[in-house]
Image: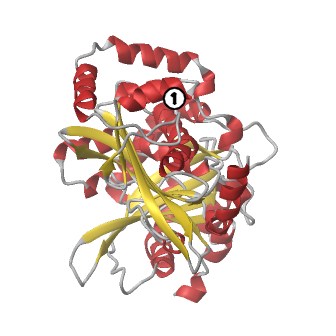
Amino acid sequence: MAGSRVLRVLGILAIVFGSAIRAHAQVSPNEILDPHLKELEKEYFPQLKTINQEIARTSFPFPFYLSRVVGLDPAHQVEADSRGLEFRRFQDRIILIATGNYNAAYDSKQFTRNERAARTFRDVFLPILQVITSNLPPDADCDAIGIEVAFHVRDVAKTYDFEGRDILVTVLDRKDAFQMVQEKDDNARQEILNRSLIYLGGQPYGLSLLDRDPFIVDPQARSQSRKDQAASTPEVSTSASRLIRNNPNLLPSASMANSAAGMSDAPKVDLSQAKPAVTQTDADRLQSQYQPQLDALAKEGLAKFAFVDYDPPAFVAVSKQMVLQMTMKNTARFDPEKANIYKRAAQTFDLFLAPKMKDLLEQIPSELPFDYYDFSVINPLVSNTDGKERSEAIEFLLPKTLAQKFANAEITNQELLDKGQVLVNGVRIALNLQLVE
């Protein structure tokens, strides 16, 4: 109890940085050079977006942000690339890895290094693993699931305070990852960790959930264990799949999906109307019912509205509301050194999305029952300094009725955006068009 109070006090400053709302911005398959990894990204793109969204709405003891760069200071996390979920190659294996920054500051005098890592595992790794395994099929085409998280460590000396950081990485064989979320006690979890790859500060580490100090790592035993796992029969995955489907407690709860970390907290938009909450099951049912209309929209969008081929229009559930999500690629390119995120977002709306909106909305059947549009625009970013091309995702989450009014010239662009939400790489921003243009 005392340790919990100390951690809470030392991490309170980090809460300031927890107000940004993350959504389902996801690495584009077109950014991936490895052909096999690119195909995996395309195949599982809808699941990856959902995982991103649900991790963003998961309640952690302290703020956690997905990020492609770990070890960032909290002040630099808002504008960082938050698409910290992708397939990678690691030691001749393909893993799905989630990376991010956890804004807790552990007191080094209260917690040993092993205790800090164990607490991070329980508070952050397990909830993230729960989200991943709830949305990814147990027979997914990857060898392992990995999670990499940076957290803060505070050391107080007689003359100064020093805050450093540590980075914990776990790589679990795919079937072990699904088994881990089913275990109810640390003894069973420890058995899985003992045969998994764990690194702390870049070095192999014997993480112990049962003791204050780590155990000595036996690399040969871990290597042999992985070989045994690879030789196991396919029935293991089938069994894991059956257990997951038969245990509703393994799925994200409705209360979690509509928690205070979700979009329903926004001051200018109410996404929690007094009606039954929409779930992803409802969205999937609607997707199946209206698939022919969505296929026609996707075909028209590819031809006329710069839709991407790897992410066709789809229904998704966002904070109790039914959302029609469409992904487009901007025809303009931006130099990130000359235009900040606000200017890029404003120009993306005014010069790319807004001119298309009237014609685009006319292609969407009026009978489709949903509440919001999610226009996700991929912006190419090319730096004149190094010539490298990257990308960012700017999402415009807009009420369906107001989007139609804007298309009919009944309201202004600012009135529409004020009633919606704008997110850059999953981070919500306030956008005043006149101030940034």
Location of residue 382 in the rendering, given as x and y in whole percent from the top left corner: 28, 76
Q: Residues within 10 Å of mark 1 (few under 14, many from 20)?
A: some
Camera-nearest residue between 155 and 46 = 155
Q: Is residue 166 above or below residue 416?
A: above
SS for callout 1: loop
Residue 20 visible in rendering: yes
Location of residue 88 in the rendering, given as x and y in whole percent from the top left corner: 27, 46
Count all numbered tags in the image, as a single digit. Answer: 1
Q: Quadrant of residue 434?
A: bottom right
Residue 137 visible in rendering: no
Q: How is the image coloured?
A: secondary structure
Q: Quadrant of residue 423?
A: bottom right
Camera-nearest residue between 38 and 236 = 236
Q: Is residue 144 above or below residue 386?
A: above
Camera-nearest residue between 437 and 390 = 390
Instruction: Identify residue for label 1.
Output: 181
Q: Amino acid at mark 1?
A: Val
What residue appears at the point 62 percent right and 62 percent down from the top-left corner?
403
Q: Is residue 167 above or below residue 320?
A: below
What residue appears at the point 41 percent right and 84 percent down from the top-left corner?
339
Q: Is residue 397 above or below residue 194?
A: below
Location of residue 270 in the rendering, given as x and y in whole percent from the top left corner: 75, 56
Location of residue 330 in the rendering, given as x and y in whole percent from the top left corner: 37, 67
In the image, 277: left or right of 173? right
What residue appears at the point 68 percent right and 73 percent down from the top-left corner?
415
| Extreme residue in the right direction | 274
